[in-house]
Amino acid sequence: MSDPGETIRFTVSVPSELLEALDRRVGTQAYASRSELVRDLIRERMIADRWAAGDQEVVGVLTIAYDHHVPDLPQRIMEVQHSRFVNVLCTTHVHLDHDHCLEAVIIRGRPSEIERIAAQIGGLRGVTACGLTKAAIV
């Protein structure tokens, strides 16, 4: 068995067109190497699989933009966050302009509960944008 921190080389065979596409992405996204890009792609897939399985705790960042002049909207956003069994680890609130606010909410829990919160908040009148960035330790 290898050391978990040890880097292992392995060979992957791909069609030339796919390799060319990979190399273009390495260049346009400023990756140092193909290996860095492939590692990121593997991690992204593992995170997506963990969220899809739904049986383990995950983390996410819910980004919410809203019109703070809509009556009781900040209170309703907070009530949704408290209505499910997830852990709100941190909330950052910023004023974008006179009428709009943005919140970034870092949450931990089961994927279905986090996604339900995102959907509920996104559906509130006055919320102009609501996006969920999915993460997990893989």
Image (tube, grey):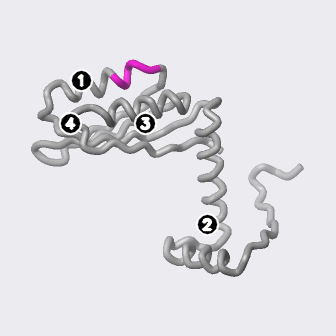
> Which residue does the numbered mark 4 point to in the structure image?
126
Rendered residue at 75%/53% (across/down) = 5
Q: Earlier in the sequence, mark 1 or mark 2?
A: 2
Rendered residue at 27%/38% (across/down) = 93
Q: Is residue 117 left or right of residue 51?
A: left
* Picture disc at residue 75: 1
Question: Front-most of 15 and 113?
Answer: 15
Rendered residue at 59%/39% (across/down) = 51
Q: Position of residue 21 (x, y in %)?
A: 60, 76
**Magenta-drawn stretch contains 6:** no
Mark 1: amino acid: Gln
Rendered residue at 49%/27% (across/down) = 113
> Which residue does the numbered mark 2 point to in the structure image?
37
The residue stretch that appears in magenta: 80-84
Looking at the rendered image, the disc whose residue lies closer to the viewer, 4 or 1, is: 4
Q: Mark 2–mark 4 contact, CB under 8 Å? A: no
Query: Alpha carbon of mark 1 to alpha carbon of mark 3: how far?
Result: 18 Å
